[in-house]
Image (cartoon, rainbow, N blue to C red):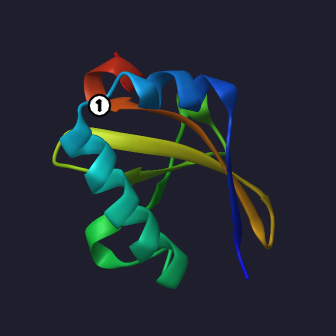
């Protein structure tokens, strides 16, 4: 079974999100547990600042970035709009 952790940086960002986005994140995490590569997550590899990490879509503009720690563990690093994360 996959284990999901969050970095303290992610936790700080998450706290500032609207209740609607928090709810959407929880919905997407359920999908992520079932199938990390489900089409609606648009799970993809990143370059640049987040080289070696992956991103999933939470809403049209909100992304969550995570790192695969090992086969069974992922750690969510940060969350925010595309512009905030890549701007």
Residue 40 in view, yes or no: yes
Farthest-out residue, top: 87
* Of 77 and 47, the residue lying toward us: 77
Task: Identify the residue position indicated by label 1 in the image.
Answer: 82
Residue at 37%, 78% in the rendered image: 38
**Residue 83 at what x, y percent from top left?**
27, 22
**Is 38 above or below relative to 79?**
below
Quadrant containing the C terminus is top left
**Residue 31 at what x, y percent from top left?**
40, 75
Mark 1 falls on what kind of element? helix
Residue count near mark 1 (Cα–Cα under 10 Å), binned few <14, some 14–19, many ≥20: some
Residue 42 in view, yes or no: no
Asked if residue 58 lies left or right of residue 31, the reply is left
Which quadrant of the view contains residue 37? bottom left
Farthest-out residue, front: 19
**Is 75 above or below relative to 38?**
above
**Residue 68 at what x, y percent from top left?**
72, 57
**Is 49 above or below relative to 74?**
above
Quadrant containing the N terminus is bottom right
Asked if residue 43 lies left or right of residue 75, the reply is left
**Residue 58 at what x, y percent from top left?**
30, 51
Asked if residue 70 lies left or right of residue 45, the reply is right
* Of 29 and 70, the residue lying toward us: 29
Which quadrant of the view contains residue 6? top right
Asked if residue 50 lies left or right of residue 81, the reply is right
Residue at 78%, 72% in the rendered image: 72
Residue at 53%, 21% in the rendered image: 12
């Amino acid at each position: 079974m996959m284990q999901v952790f969050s970095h303290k940086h992610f936790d700080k960002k998450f706290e500032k999100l609207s209740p609607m986005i928090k709810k959407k994140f929880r919905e997407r995490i359920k999908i992520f547990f079932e199938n990390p590569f489900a089409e609606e997550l648009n799970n993809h590899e990143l370059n640049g600042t987040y080289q070696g990490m992956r991103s999933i879509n939470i809403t049209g503009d909100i992304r969550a970035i995570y790192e695969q720690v090992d086969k069974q563990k992922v750690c969510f690093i940060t969350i925010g709009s595309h512009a905030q994360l890549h701007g």
